[in-house]
Image (cartoon, helix red, strand yellow):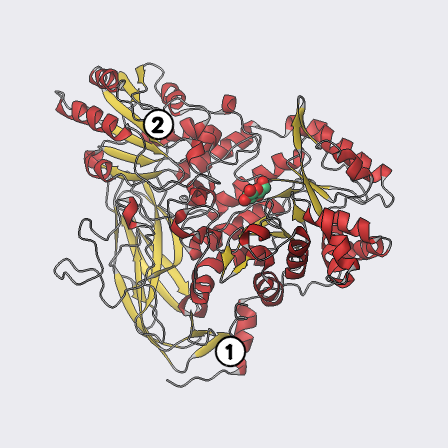
Amino acid sequence: MSVRATCLTLCLTLCLTPPLGAQPRDRADRVADSVLKLMTLDEKVGQLVQMPGAWNQTGPAAPAGGEDQVRQGKVGSFLSIWGAAVTRHLQEIAVRETRLHVPLLFAMDVIHGWRTIFPVPLGEAASWDPAAAERSARVAATEGAAYGIHWTFAPMVDIARDARWGRVVEGSGEDPYLGAALAAARVRGFQNGPPNTTLMATVKHFAAYGAAEAGRDYNTAELSERTLWETYLPPYEAAVRAGAATVMASFNDIGGTPAHASRWLLQDVLRDRWRFRGLVVSDWAGLEELIPHGIAGTRAEAAVRAINAGIDVDMSDNVYATDLAAQVRAGRVTMTTIDSAVHRVLRAKAAFGLFENPYKYSDTTRERTAILTAANRATAREVARESIVLLRNEGGVLPLAKSLRSVAVIGPLADDPKVPLGSWNGAGQAQDVVTPLAGIKEALPNARVTVARGTPVDTPNTSGIAAAVQAAQGADAVILVLGERDDMSGEASSRASVELPGSQLELAQAVIRAARSATPAKPVVTVLMNGRPLAVPWLADSAGALVESWFLGVEHGHALADVLFGDALPVGKLPITFPRATGQLPIYYNHKNTGRPGDVTNHYTSRYLDLPWTPLFPFGYGLSYTTFSYGTPRVSSASVRNGDSVYVDADVTNTGKRAGVEVAQLYVHDSVASVTRPVRSLAGFQRVSLNPGETKRVRFALGPNALALYDLTMRRVVEPGAFTVFVGGDSDTQNAAHFTVTGDTLVLAPAPPRMR
Ligand code: BGC
């Protein structure tokens, strides 16, 4: 194989990835310059300190002594303080009572909505709709900004392939392509909007926090550089390229260095390779944790490691506050390093216009009027509908008829108003939530709706099952609502088992068997609520209909009822593989083929003795109320010159009796390469609306970037040779076409900096 890097290829690299950081110095820079010049070392360090709020009788406030710290210029930003009045009060202290009148920034985890709570990010990812994710981030930003918040710690873009990890709920699932598209959309949604409604977005957690070994939160991420670059880094890069203002370091270590001390991650990759100009913030106590990580003996050493690696702002643990200035005076940290970090903080404040009007986000009227509006709720309902995934619909149980005279709604989650809020629910309130039961009742005003809890969520107790069976027997149809509580996923909420918790499977089995054996048999729909993939093989085989509803936010019940009763179509597709059992984890569609791919006829292949190696539901999977068929894809040319794009066309037909929306997916596989390649990788997706009998053609463009790999020397290249493309409704599709790339190896980018 001949290898030739040409000038053309370099140009191509630049065209494909517009350089960041090339922005000219602007007004915000000049404001930052002028303020920085006046600062003492202690005032500079103050700007790098982020203090957490505390809670008193009236709401969030500065912790004891916090206001004095502000007065002395020892705080640059707060986290977890919100509200127009309290932010104005603290801002007044900063602006009127400090020597240099530098305003504060208020930061907060505005993750999937502020008061109008949207689906959890993993659920929203199931919409495969970046425009929806952008809209939901826009609403969240508008509401958060009305509460005095400038800065959100979102989007979380960590790729996760082990469903035991609780924080899988906060991201977009397992795939770098889908993850990158959603990451960029969310950054745009948070940051682009009318004045005083935007938040600085934070790409977190940099990097590879989702690769925590064994799915145990905060655990080490043990990865090759190739896997990092191919799988884990693309969503962070996409978010940075979308203009994210800040990046948060991750708790884990990679290759022997915790991210909070990694010059490789924070300088070589983030600033040098990606030209990131924004702020880098630590995660909660991430500096202090360099001590248990074992790379710093003291807080002073931790401060030196972190600032020299590239952590600008120290969240919550006061390490910079107590130790940084002394280390500068001792010569272990240069003033240039401090100045660069402080300049970035000041620049962010100036970019918001806070030096001119520090109170622009602290507006008590907006706080009352911009929140939980009918329009925001309507957007939340739309996004929630789109996030629902239909996993099974045996015999067309769904949609249920609105003429049903009676329904039994069964299960511990059916009427819990807190659970649909999911983790990180901002100012979300249970009183705002439409529960599944409330949504069903509203959709069926004339039906008799009986309710039975059946079992608790996660403690084994079968005493309520008999009553639940009775309720099922007395109704025309049964809706079971099962899964996990909101606090069973999220930070520090990993589970060693991803099976249905407690006695819920027994409940489902008893109810479904009873409904089946009734005359006539009763339709049963099982609705799952959860923040991670669940291993539910029995339900996948035996439930009449199985619906994945995640935690959909305040409009959960409405959106669910819309889909169950056919006012909306199920359009969601899984953004993450569902396993048959915990023992299959980690499991993901874009794995390597291995030398001995699983083969049922051959014992000595990559498989289990006690379970198939295949997933319960593959990535990209989701049914509709109609059916779709795909024509064999056609490529624009069977032989493509390296560097040219190839177009892939496929006909999608609605073969059922109802209108439907399908997310057509394109996967690509490099058949023979210099390094092993995934069996397939998502390279495009498109939504297609089709009436019964209608056919539409989808067209995907595959540019060099979609065909590229990191070669043995880690250059990003497109190698000549055979490629296969697949077009279909999930990652299992066998609907394939082939083409060959001819010519020399094309170098798209030089090797990234090696890990150090
Ligand atoms: C989490 C972050 C979050 C931060 C601030 C940490 O424990 O890991 O994701 O942004 O707290 O609340």
Name the mark nearer the viewer: 1 or 2: 2
Report whether the residue tagged 2 is closer than 8 Å to ligand 1. Answer: no
Label 2: few (<14), some (14–19) or many (≥20) C-alpha neighbours in 10 Å = many
Tell me which amino acid carries mark 1: Thr
Q: Is residue 729 above or below residue 427?
A: below
Give the residue at the far front of this rendering. 297
Label 1: few (<14), some (14–19) or many (≥20) C-alpha neighbours in 10 Å = some
Q: Is residue 216 above or below residue 754?
A: above
Where residue 340 appears, x then y in whole percent? Answer: 74, 59
Where residue 247 appears, x then y in whole percent? Answer: 60, 53
* Label drawn at residue 603: none
Going from the N terminus, do you reach mark 1 or mark 2 first?
Answer: 1
Q: Which residue in the protein does label 2 denote?
A: 457
Quarter residue 89 falls in: top right
Q: Is residue 157 left or right of residue 590?
A: right
From where the camera sits, is residue 566 visible?
A: no
Q: Dividing the image into four equal quarters, which quarter contains ligand 1? A: top right
Tell me which amino acid carries mark 2: Val
697 or 733: nearer the eye? 733
- SS category of the residue bearing label 1: helix
Quarter residue 648 falls in: bottom left
Q: CA distance from mark 1 to mark 2?
A: 57 Å
Q: Which residue in the protein does label 1 denote?
A: 9
Where residue 290 appears, x then y in whole percent? Answer: 58, 53
Where residue 505 appears, x then y in whole percent? Answer: 25, 31
Quick one: quadrant of the N terminus? bottom left
- SS category of the residue bearing label 2: loop
Identified at 82% across, 55% down, the residue is: 36
Quick one: quadrant of the C terminus? bottom right
